[in-house]
Image (spheres, rainbow, N blue to C red):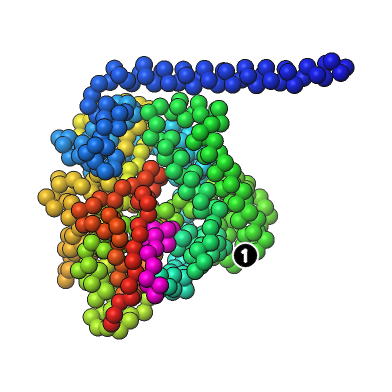
Amino acid sequence: MEAADSSLPWAAQCLGAALFAAALCVAALGVVLTLLRRWPWCSCHVCRAYLTGSWARDFTNLGDWYAHLLRDSPTGTVHVHVLGCTVTANPANVEYMLRTNFDNFPKGKAFAAVLGDLLGGGIFNVDGHAWLHQRKMASLELGSVAVRSYAFGIVAQEVESRLVPVLASAADAGAVVDLQDVFRRFAFDTICKISFGLDPGCLDLEMPVSKLADAFDTATRLCAMRGAAASPLLWKAKRLLNVGSERELREAIKLVDELSAAMIRERRKLGVAGSHDLLSRFMASSGDARHDVDDKYLRDIVVSFLLAGRDTVSSALTTLFMLLSKNPAVASAMRAEAAGGDESTAALTYEHLKRLHYTHAVLYENMRLFPPVQFDSKFSAGSDVLPDGTYVAGGTRVTYHPYAMGRMPRIWGADHGAFRPDRWLTGPGGTFVPESLYRYPVFQAGLRVCLGKELAVTEMKAVAVAVVRAFDVEVVGDGGNAACAPKFVSGLTASISGGLPVRIRRVVR
């Protein structure tokens, strides 16, 4: 018996070694298949530049390189064969994908695999009935007057009680602060209160560390790296071996899962009856008072809300104040509009914000140049021909690129690179007039148009007005150079590498 027992560790070691060797073979096979299928036989300049990274010699960001390629293309569409992807900045193609032939351009199984470990079955990662069911529920809740009033009250409170005091403290101390970090904390606190009725307190003056926010940042960054890989076999092999970035991703998602579960337990403990936060309303409408709803389903909703309400808002606010620092006349015009033409401080109310057409135009112009989500991909369920004549094979990725579209002269004219808010003020008396969402798909368009668009714009407006009328914000370092373009890091939403260091000064009235 002892001899048999002593052989067990040796047998386990042999089995482990065999499994490890098999995994290595799979990884090696993935690399070989990738090379055989795509390189060096694909010798076009686009694929070579992508694979070698030579595009970085001339462009700050990958998005700038794509914008260059798409401007040079007669159709506004290019193929990146090494990725098996068609990239377009043609509004007719965008409308075809998001409205005309919507059913042929779902997110697709390949996209779901890239983000599945993080987003699960949440609304941003599913198609068909699951997507339609969640969208109907979200539309019902976000369209509720009670929810909108509740959300705006939270935004106004967070601006007054946390954001403004933090910036005032930095101004009085003469300190340089990372405004990107400040806005991330603000947006995280706000979305947690609106969505879950819970307060993480990330924007307290002590600037506490949030394990959930940090783990979420790590997970979104590494998921974006999956999507940029030349072949999914590469990251799938690393996941199988549990090494490198995939090991880090697994640990980050484990922490997200644990903390999301804690939030759901706390929400149940506090009760959902009479609560206006979105999670409580989802739980109540799904019969969760009887604990009938699967915790995994609720976890996926939690993560989807965080992705929608935190990173996008903080990204847009960060680039907004980067642009205002370089264009002080625009900040002054916003300040004058918010004051109603005099030096009095107008109340920060929903109705007051709706009347601020110039500020609205500034926000839209900022997101034209720096959309929080720089590109979005679908998969062609079947072979198709886009309106510009581009053939796409079934099962291949088709990406529309809002970042590049904001830099297309055929859409925005010769001054497409200029920050000019008045391009939006073409209505009677200089009022704001929106552009077609297919030319400006910052909030997506068609059947997948963003349900939280109005809430997000109102939140950004409230922050912009409160900060501009109280402070001057000056970007320091290279980021303050008018000719210096921001460098973005890989992620599901745009994030400036190194943050946005600024110096805050109180406005002298």
> Where, by quadrant of the figure, is residue 271 drawn?
bottom right
Residue 365 point in image, percent of width and height = 24, 58
Residue 362 in the figure: left or right of residue 231: left
Furthest residue toward left: 414
Q: Which residue is mark 1?
A: 273
Dominant secondary structure, magenta: helix
Residue 397 point in image, percent of width and height = 35, 32
Residue drawn at (25%, 35%), measured in percent from left and top?
55
* Amino acid on which disc 1 is placed: Ala
> Is residue 385 shown above or below 432?
above
172 in magenta: yes
Residue 357 point in image, percent of width and height = 25, 68
Residue drawn at (43%, 32%), measured in percent from left and top?
110
The residues colored magenta run 171-184
Q: Work out whether residue 452 or residue 223 is closer to the camera in this orientation and state it.
A: 223
Query: Helix or strand or loop: what does disc 1 sit on?
Result: loop
Q: Quadrant of the C terminus?
A: bottom left
